[in-house]
Amino acid sequence: MHKRQIEMTDLWVRKIRTDEAREEWRDSRQPNLELRVTARGAKTWRLHYTRSDGRRKATKLGRYSSDGIAGLTLGEARKKAREIRVDVDHGRDPAGVRRALREAPTFAEVAEEWLANRSLDPNHNPHSLCDDRGMLKRHINPAIGHLKVQEICKADVLRLNRLMRSKTHARHYKDGKPRTLSVRINRVYERTRAILRWALAEDIIAADPCSGIKKPFPMEPSRNVVLNELQLKAFWLGLDSAPMEPGTRIALKLSLLTAQRIGAVASIRNADLHLADERPHWIIPHLRKGRSRKIRRHLVPLTPLTIELIAAARAIGGNGEFLFPTTSKNGALTTSGVEVAWNRSRPKLGLIGINIHDLRRTASERLRRLGHRYVVGLVLGHAPRGVTDIHYDTDDLWSDEPDKRAALEAWSHYVKTATIDDTQLSLDLLRSVA
């Protein structure tokens, strides 16, 4: 290998060949600019420099190209060498930057670290963590997971948003038109932004690529599905023959009658049920099974119909720790387990567009129509919003119990009346006549 120095010209660079395995030529006009030539005809530009600590280094500028399309011409190589010399004079290390970029983690690797960090957060919901993994696997990683996280720019995030806009829902509208993933598109963008901002906070990247990018759908469509009388009847009567475990059926009915989230119902502890009390009630604690985040402590009055369902559940599951015991590691019925059973059963009930949370929304809306508008928030267990309630709420579980009990008894009576079987109705009429 020979190192020589010459005042390079375009013609000379284009025609230079070698019989050696490799030759290196230095440009006399641009100090330390080198052209490396191999026996196979490959020509590569390199720049030698001295770091601030005195160590000699070299960095690759690119391949030679006579037209400047596939590589760098002589003039372009000299210009790039001058630019890098300015960086070196300011104490930067171009070769170190290239090495760091090669060793930099990909977005998928950073996302795994982010998930691990989220799992350690005591306020993180495990169900949400599972949803995050699903979004990364289905939508985010296939698009940008292979990219070095330091190289991700605003254009990559916008490309992901456009890709999500082109996707459609597995189910179509009744007229056959495809359904867009409007809400899911926003969730995918929000998770991508959260991961990149975490990388910024951890000093993995130097800038936030999501800065200035708005949510793809600023106004998300609100869901306002409420079961009508026919759907309510189909739910209540059809559930008894639905292909699911008896305990799951009871949990769904309790969610409707108590207007509580299915997660709270599924993880009921028998110790929190006070059926023998003069005023039967259920206390939802600050922490419940399967949820690491604290929630608002809440008292739910139990009506006679609700007590019947609880008694039926105890007849099935016994009087152990949980009202709905299972053999899973949680020991109790889970939200995901109920959702799987419901999604499998609802087409047979004619309720394919009904979600489990629609039961809670139905109870809320019906309570308003039954004249209990101002008690709905108390029944649902929502946090107080008014200044007085926020600052002077003593967390007295019993202060609103009479109002909540009256509302839930009215709702329980409505459900029992609206869902009564026609055959049972005829028998009741015959008994009343006799």
Image: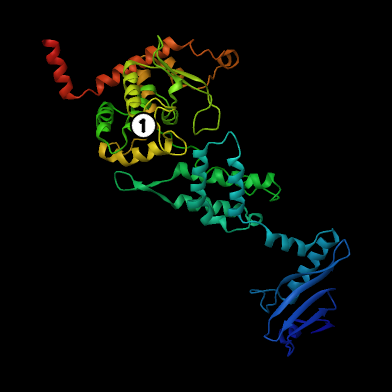
**Which one is nearer the viewer's eye here, 98 or 311?**
311
Residue 433 showing in the rendered view: yes
Q: Is residue 304 left or right of residue 267?
A: left
**Which one is nearer the viewer's eye here, 412 or 229?**
412
Q: Is residue 248 left or right of residue 62?
A: left
- At horizontal 55% and vertical 27% (from top left) the residue drawn is 294
The answer to whether residue 37 is above or below residue 283 is: below
Quadrant of residue 225 within the rendered picture:
top left
Residue occupied by mark 1: 225
Q: Is residue 113 left or right of residue 185?
A: right
- At horizontal 45% and vertical 25% (from top left) the residue drawn is 269
The answer to whether residue 102 is above or below residue 235 is: below
SS for dot 1: loop
Residue 216 showing in the rendered view: no
Dot 1 alpha-carbon crowd within 10 angstroms: few under 14, some 14 to 19, many 20 or more:
some
Mark 1 residue type? Val
**Which one is nearer the viewer's eye here, 240 or 93?**
240
- At horizontal 43% and vertical 35% (from top left) the residue drawn is 334
Farthest-out residue, bottom = 19
The answer to whether residue 146 is above or below residue 8 is: above
For the N terminus, give its image quadrant.
bottom right
Quadrant of residue 312 within the rendered picture:
top left
